[in-house]
Image: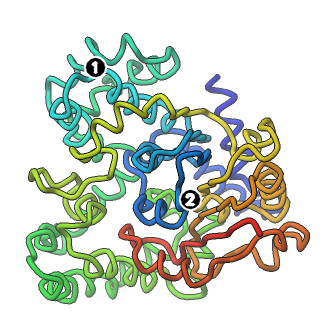
Amino acid sequence: MAVQARRIIDDAVVRKAARPGEKLLDRAFAFAFKGLVYPQIWEDPVVDMEGLAIERDSRIVCIASGGCNALSYLVADPAAVVAVDLNRAHVALGRLKAAAIRHLPTYERFRRFVAEADHHENREVYDSLIAPNLDPESRRYWESRDATGRRRIGHFTRGIYRQGLLGGFIGVAHLLARLYRIDLSRVLAAETLEEQRAVFERELAPVFDRRFVRWLTDHPASLFGLGIPPAQYAALAGGERMAAVLRRRLEKLACGFAVADNYFAWQAFGRAYDRRPEAALPPYLQRANWTAMRERIGRLDVRNANMEHHLGQADATSHDRYLLLDAQDWMDDAQLNALWAQITRTARPGARVLFRTAAEPSLLPGRLAPDLLDRWTYREALSADLTARDRSSIYGGVHLYELA
């Protein structure tokens, strides 16, 4: 099973037409991507749900990543959510979160396990309440040993959001900030947007003018920790130095939204969710949604699969909401057209597709075959509005297409 999972990732990441040096970078990223990458997904589910206009009979297929958004879509009361992912660690994480919703007795216990995720007793909670109800593959993952020799479920006693490739990347960023004598917690302590901007301009913005930071971010491998493969690096840079691009994205994250309402900012600058009772959290973690999550969790199916292959096995006109995250940035034209052929075949009338891109424009014009692209209407104004309101702030564009 593990060999098959590695092959799935290699097939998706390693570009067939790339030069030898580019293939080497692709393989390095593929190797890094085989472990846990995203303990939390970095796309705003509130924006997703508004763009998709989810209805009671909606059948959603999405990329799982950290599982947060696939779970959060249940708040909108769809008929079904299928979450697929190439990465078996992400599949195990999504299934673990779902099992916690099903089998933990109270919201308080669930919040301590998943939202706070750093209590010593969480290991016992897993062993007694979750593990007996977890599928064998996911249980093997969480009970196997990581590189330090400790059981992976121990991540939930040490802070799951500090783990994985992204958690490590943010940790290194915090270390670099300390070396430059920057206190990132000051962003979270700011009480107004004006104070947030003052902290950014005074402390964070000058870092991107540092020679070492400019040199470091000029290398594609420096962004592996963000889950950005070499194929996406050039699109993100858009002809600029990467330091300038990252400065703008961080500025939006630090200054674009009140930190009290933005759990992405808490993860970036605090490496955890805010613990106050009124804290902003993903929809699936909010107390107000606990009862609905318990009632609807059976509608979620998390699978280790490639999106195109999964849709290839689905019936025609069987889905009507699709979420692709930024996966298309990784694809060549052949992969892109094969995916959209399956999306179009399986889409019901009025279906919607939402995805993100590292660069600002949609990547479909000029790359997707006209007979496919002409079937879909680009919701340009709504896409621009969703992009502006995406609290994760790291993408150039959020794009919404509707079946004509």
Q: Residue at x 50, y 14 (%)?
A: 136
Q: Can you say which quadrant of the picture contains the C terminus?
A: bottom right
x%, y% of residue 125?
Answer: 22, 19
Crowd around label 2: few <14 · some 14–19 · many ≥20 (10 Å) = many
What amino acid type should be assigned to the residue bearing mark 1?
A: Tyr
x%, y% of residue 34?
Answer: 55, 40
Q: CA distance from mark 1 to mark 2?
A: 30 Å
What amino acid type should be assigned to the residue bearing mark 2?
A: Leu
> Relative to residue 252, is residue 7 depicted above or below?
above
| Nearer to the camera, 369 or 400 | 400
Q: Would you say 181 lies left or right of 76 here?
A: left
The residue under label 1 is 126
Q: Residue furthest right?
A: 371
x%, y% of residue 223?
Answer: 48, 64
| Nearer to the camera, 164 or 112 | 112
Q: Can you say which quadrant of the picture contains the N terminus?
A: top right
Q: Would you say 337 lies left or right of 91 here?
A: right
The residue under label 2 is 325
> Relative to residue 272, is residue 365 depicted above or below?
below
x%, y% of residue 397?
Answer: 54, 76
Disc on the earlier residue, 1 or 2:
1
Residue 154 seen in render = yes
